[in-house]
Amino acid sequence: MLQKILPDKFYKILSEKVNMKSVNEIRLRADKPVVINVSGKAFFLCENGVTSNIKNALYASKIMIEDVIFRASECSIYSVNEQIKKGFIVTDEAVRIGIGGNLIDEQGQIKTMTNFTSCNIRVPHVVKNCSLSAFPLLFSDGVVQNTLVISPPGCGKTTFLRDFVFQLSQHEITLNVLLLDERGELDCGINSNYTDRIAFSTKKVGFENGIRSLGPDIIVTDELGQEQDIEAVKMASSCGVKLLASVHADSMEIFQTKALFKGILQEKIFKRFVLLSKRNGPGTLEGVYNENFARLALGRL
Amino acid sequence: MKYVFIILLFLGCCGVGYFFSLKYSRRKKFFNSLIALADKLSLEINFSRERLKVLLQNFDATAKKDLLGIDETFIAYLDKTQELSGDAIFKKADCLKQDEKDAVLLFLKTLGRSDVENQTKEIQTFISRFTEFKKQSDEQQKKYGSLSIKLGVVAGLFLAIILF
């Protein structure tokens, strides 16, 4: 999937000299060395693979970055302008590419982004069973609990959510799952017979439409971060739909201080909190907590 | 035998004249098709926002024939199997002048590289330019295209009379 979007030279090195299964991110910045995040650690790309020595690093150019974005949009930037306005593109294979450049603003409205100067290619992975040790703790009396997956960026929140949906199907739990895939990167290799998907919609619209039309038992969505996301969560919760979502935070303590979540924490809408980190590589499970933030003992099914 | 040779010589001269006139009609047809393609792209990019490759593939098959293979080479470039260079794009388009080739190459290079509003404006600018080329090719076809055929016929007749 990266062959289509990366410059040939970089792709050749990555495919021949780097273990792609452990590559999390590829960062290209204009006239700067190419940075590869391998198992949570940053290296430079060089002729022989990856290196920590900047002297051997390969550099990206502005033209290369423009070409990556052009290729990622299937050579049709106009068709993904709504995504570009939000600062990213998601390819058909769920590769999310964050973009840096100049935002063009007209009368307070973002029109597009031009003069691309950097991009961050996030390589999606399906890590089978990565949610398995937390899986039983996310149920109480056989009912899925509203769960929030917490971690800093790049620690495997999305991978955890994907695997949770996969595990539901593996354990023959025939609950209808709605993937509310706001950025189109959640549905990557999920093999489930009970999953519907609404993509590229805001949480508010997706929750409303999804609950009305698809009647889900569980809604799985990525990254709550705005006031209207919280409103959507409250609305879904009041409808009796279970929720599995993620949020950015370094630790449980920092998460609890976030003003945005004060209301739903007081209302105890979320009954489980899964904390992930990069301590032993992305996806390290630090703990599962209940609504009173008491740590639950981890188990394995 | 002599008469057969004279007839063949006459037909040969007419053929050469026709061959030269073809260059002008191919050029005219090329710009007709290119303008039709640019119009379609402008319209579709505005409304359906369909991917460039799909739009090119779905372009009218009859008009496609007159594009002298530039659409196929451009699709190969989109598939990352070919470079976007003048040599590759204009392999079959020897009837075009250098400034026309430059404009067409620039047009292809701008496709798919901006948002709807800018892309549409760019395409409209190119359509105006291609319309100018079309006008020129139209005039030249009328002037030199028919002249080539007439010269071929006259030369054929002239040689036939001398040999007769």
Image (cartoon, coloured by chain):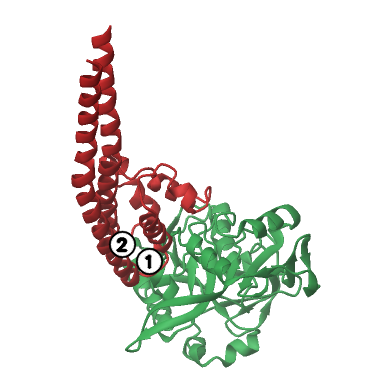
Which residue appears at 49% of the width and 53% of the height?
Answer: B85
Residue beneath disc 1? A78
**Which chain has been coloured green in this picture?**
A
Q: Position of residue B146 (x, y in %)?
A: 19, 39
Q: Position of residue B63 (x, y in %)?
A: 27, 43
Instruction: Please state which amino acid type lies under the numbered disc 1.
Output: Tyr
In the figure, what tint was chain B given?
red
Residue B45, numbered circle? 2
Which residue appears at 48% of the width and 86% of the height?
Answer: A264
Tell me the element at label 1: helix
**Chain where mark 1 sits:** A
User: Would residue A52 be visible to someone looking at this image?
Assistant: no
- The residue nearer to you, when weighing A261 against A87, is A87
Q: Where B36 falls versus A200 (above or below)?
A: above
Query: Are the residues tagged 1 and 2 within 8 Å (C-beta)?
Result: yes
Q: Which quarter of the image is occupied by the C terminus of chain A?
A: bottom right
Q: Position of residue A135 (x, y in %)?
A: 62, 65
User: Would residue A23 be visible to someone looking at this image?
Assistant: yes
- The residue nearer to you, when weighing B96 against B161, is B161
Which residue appears at 41% of the width and 61% of the height?
Answer: B106
Residue A172, numbered circle? none
Q: Position of residue A82 (x, y in %)?
A: 39, 72
Which residue appears at 50% of the width and 87% of the height?
Answer: A261
Instruction: Please state which amino acid type lies under the numbered disc 2.
Output: Ile
- The residue nearer to you, when weighing A57 against A44, is A57
In the picture as drawn, the residue positioned furthest to the top comes out as B1
